[in-house]
Image (spheres, rainbow, N blue to C red):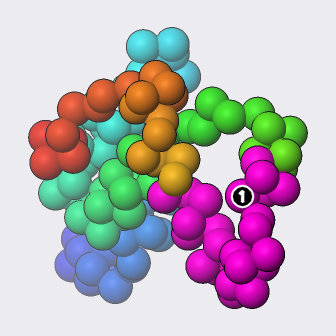
Amino acid sequence: MKAKLVSSINKSELDRYLEEQVENNSLDFDILSWWKGNKGKYPILAKAARDILVIPVSTVASESAFSARGRFLSPHRRRLHPDKLEALMCTQNWIWAPIRGGIPEEEPLASI
């Protein structure tokens, strides 16, 4: 028993998670609720899962997103570093999405 306890202490949180039994694959499975219920067992993974899983799925078609680049790039903006340009385009999308009805209101992150 002692050897089993010591070996489980030495395993990483990720290793312990990967050794878990696979959950029943059903349509009503709520992955955010699962992570909320297991955050005591896997605190680091639960926090990472929450941060990743709450990112809204984009409703903008990729073709539309690429065509926006041409409208967004003025001669002045072409001098921007690609990272800055991407940040500006994302920010503009996030600001206008509620007005266009693109991002539905979600429950506050603190409750997840």
Report which residue position mark 1 lands on: 72
**43 sits left or right of 82 in the view:** left
The one of 44 and 63 positioned closer to us in this rendering? 63
Quarter in which the N terminus is drawn: bottom left
Q: Classify mark 1: residues with Cα within 10 Å, few (<14), some (14-19) or many (20+).
A: few
Question: Bounds of the magenta span?
Answer: 68-91
List x then y, in percent, for residue 88.
56, 66
73, above or below 7, in the image: above
List x then y, in percent, for residue 87.
56, 69
List x then y, in percent, for residue 37.
20, 41
**Image quadrant assignment for residue 10:** bottom left
Q: Give the structural element (helix, strand or loop) at label 1.
A: helix
Picture residue at 54% right of the left edge, 22% below the top: 25
Residue pushed farthest front? 75
Residue 71 is covered by the magenta coloring? yes
Picture residue at 63% right of the left edge, 30% below the top: 59
Kindly report the secondary structure that dominates the magenta region of the rendered protein. helix
68, above or below 88, in the image: above
The one of 47 and 70 positioned closer to us in this rendering? 70
**100 sits left or right of 69 in the view:** left
